[in-house]
Amino acid sequence: MNKTVALYTLGCKLNFSETSTIGNEFLQNGFTKVEFNESANVYVINTCTVTENAEKDCRQIVRRALRQNHDAYIIVTGCYAQLRADDIAKIPGVDAVLGSSEKFKIFELIKDFEKQELSCIYVNPTEELSDFNSAHSSSADDRTRAYFKIQDGCDYKCTFCTIPLARGGSRSLDIDSAVIQFKDLIKNGYKEIIITGVNVGDYGKNIDVDFYSLLKKLVSVEGDFRIRISSIEPNLLTDEIIQLAVDNPKICNHFHIPLQSGSDKILRLMQRRYNTSDYKILIEKVVSKIPNVGIGIDVIIGFPGETEDDFLDTYNFLKELPASYLHVFTYSERPDTKAILMDGKVSAEEKKRRSSMLRILSEKKKNEFYRKMIGKNLRVLFEETEKESNLYGFTSNYVKVKYPSETDLVNNFKFVKIKSVIDNICLTEKLLNEPKMVEISL
């Protein structure tokens, strides 16, 4: 009998890399991977705990799986499973709940995938999470970009965040293993490696190395590839890392740097490790040193105590920063966090209004940044096709490019010259192999 498995991921890029590793374990044990909207013998749902919709999302996805096969074995794992195992076990149809470390031990813990009357729970206490479990995309995923996990857990104490409760303290993949796994990804044909973790910039703190040391080793690996850092805290983006991006084109000229609030009062309530002055100085330094750099910013609106003046401080602060886009999050109350006990809760209507204002600002910033690329020669990694008529890809600084062609250029680098922007996509009509540049007509 052909055994099949389907996987679903909620949350961050780190979760996606871990889901891929879980999928590979099933493949190695004789399973065939199918799409989640197909009938499968086993469904694995990798959850997130960042938003208040975690339980609702989990229930909906379990129901979707059971609609495909009401006899399927349902496994729920990930951060939400670590924190709320008993609640998940009560969801009709769930057969097994696995915590943050147990997700990598499915075949050790589950001997057969036959439904039972009661759910099984395999979750160790968070304080016992000390092992580092490697995870990355594999060639089986047939993707241009690979997510590569180098770090897990977090020692920060942000008052809104449950991630340290779900994943434990900061820990890292040893540097030699990281280099070996990175080389394997390059050998498998990936052209862009996205470095992921809960707090990537904290890499190596417990093994006497640092993130810069790892990056230096990775850029020295032979091959035609680029490295994108998924996200890095502003206090951990060092001068050395910035200079490495200046000196080595293998480091993408794109940084995603969380801010969370443009109000120093709110940053203190959040227990962030910087103030707005620190953040502004960092952004200005990055922009001054790295040509055409793309900068993404996370921001949370509606945090307890955020008055209208505090929000306007955030809005105006972001308006003046040379960012290329914003990721706007609405504050969600999470159990067992300090923020849930804070006064000054913001209404749902007010959160919606503030979120809308920042999302509009983000679209304006992206459009302005894209238009600054007009006339520039940029190297694109093509990633997908649309109805065999258009190719899409991203530049190093995370600008999306559309090229009308039926030629299969997926997973290839090409130079283009940007000539126009429509709907926040840069357009080009011709391209040539490097090192030649090409003039594009409108």
Image (cartoon, rainbow, N blue to C red):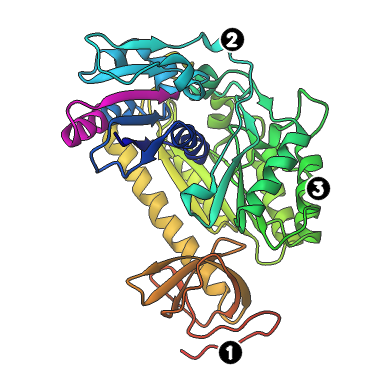
- How far apart marks 2 and 1 lie (CA) works out to 58 Å
Q: Earlier in the sequence, mark 3 or mark 1?
A: 3
**Disc 2: CA contacts within 10 A as few (<14), some (14-19) or many (>=20):** few
State the image quarter where residue 355 is shown: top left
x, y (%) of residue 325? 50, 56
Q: Which mark is residue 128?
A: 2
Q: Label 3 is placed on what type of residue?
A: Lys
Q: Does 183 sit left or right of 100 as displayed?
A: right
**Disc 1: CA contacts within 10 A as few (<14), some (14-19) or many (>=20):** some
Q: Label 2 is placed on what type of residue?
A: Glu
- Mark 3 lies on a secondary structure that is helix
> In this rendering, does residue 342 appear at all?
no
At 45% from the left and 40% from the top, the residue drawn is: 311
Q: Does 340 sit left or right of 236 as displayed?
A: left
Q: Which mark is residue 216?
A: 3
Of circles 2 and 1, the one toward us is 2
* Residue nearest the observer in this picture, 147 or 302: 147
x, y (%) of residue 189? 60, 57
Q: Earlier in the sequence, mark 3 or mark 2?
A: 2
Q: In the image, is residue 356 above or below residue 117?
A: below
Of circles 3 and 1, the one toward us is 3
- Mark 2 lies on a secondary structure that is helix
- Where does label 1 land, which residue? 439
> In this rendering, does residue 354 appear at all?
yes
Q: In the image, is residue 37 above or below residue 339?
A: below
| The residue stretch that appears in magenta | 59-78
- Mark 1 lies on a secondary structure that is loop
